[in-house]
Image: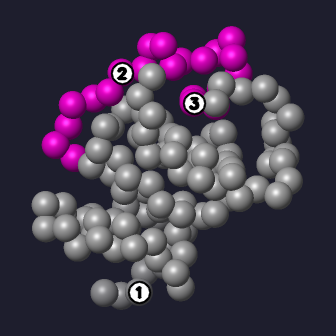
Amino acid sequence: MRIHALHKLYQQRHSRCTRPFLARGGRIERCVHCMLLPYLCICSIKKTVPTNSAFLLLMYDDEILKPSNTGRLIADLIPDTFAFIWSRTEPDPKLLALLKDPCWQPIIIFPAEYSEDSGY
């Protein structure tokens, strides 16, 4: 089992929890890695995909706790995946260092339904 950036970020965020995360389905027992029901667990069949790309996932504070996180699937498949909890006022120094690293070329992918055309 490969432990990736989302697993580490989940553990970091979960350690700060003061109460259980009880969103829809929050009381259901799940695999701690793929977050699926135990009888649907895909951990033993997941494979990484060789690629020349990497992903950097920025998430809202509670988003990492949700089991239906698409970023989790990306991190399962793409070995070079980085994950951070987004803070506009206190960005993670590791995130800033990664963005300044010349070996990466950041490209922002954002859902169109949440964006506005600014005219640029």
The numbered disc on residue 47 is: 2
Q: If the image is split into quadrants, where does the N terminus sit?
A: top left
- The amino acid beneath tag 3 is His
Frontmost of labels 1 and 3 is 3
Q: CA distance from mark 2 to mark 3?
A: 14 Å
**Image quadrant where residue 104 sits:** bottom left
* C-beta proximity under 8 Å, tags 2 and 3: no
What x and y, as percent, mark residue 64?
61, 51
Up-down relation of residue 100 to residue 51 (above or below): below
Name which residue lies at 43% across and 63% down: 110
> Which badge, 2 or 3, comes first in the chain's sequence?
3
Q: Which residues are magenta?
A: 33-53
In this view, 73 is above or below 83:
above
SS category of the residue bearing label 3: loop
Q: CB under 8 Å between callouts 1 and 3?
A: no
State whether the magenta stretch is mostly helix, strand or loop: loop
Label 1 sits on a secondary structure element that is loop
Q: Is residue 61 visible?
A: yes
Mark 2 or mark 1: whose residue is earlier in sequence: 2
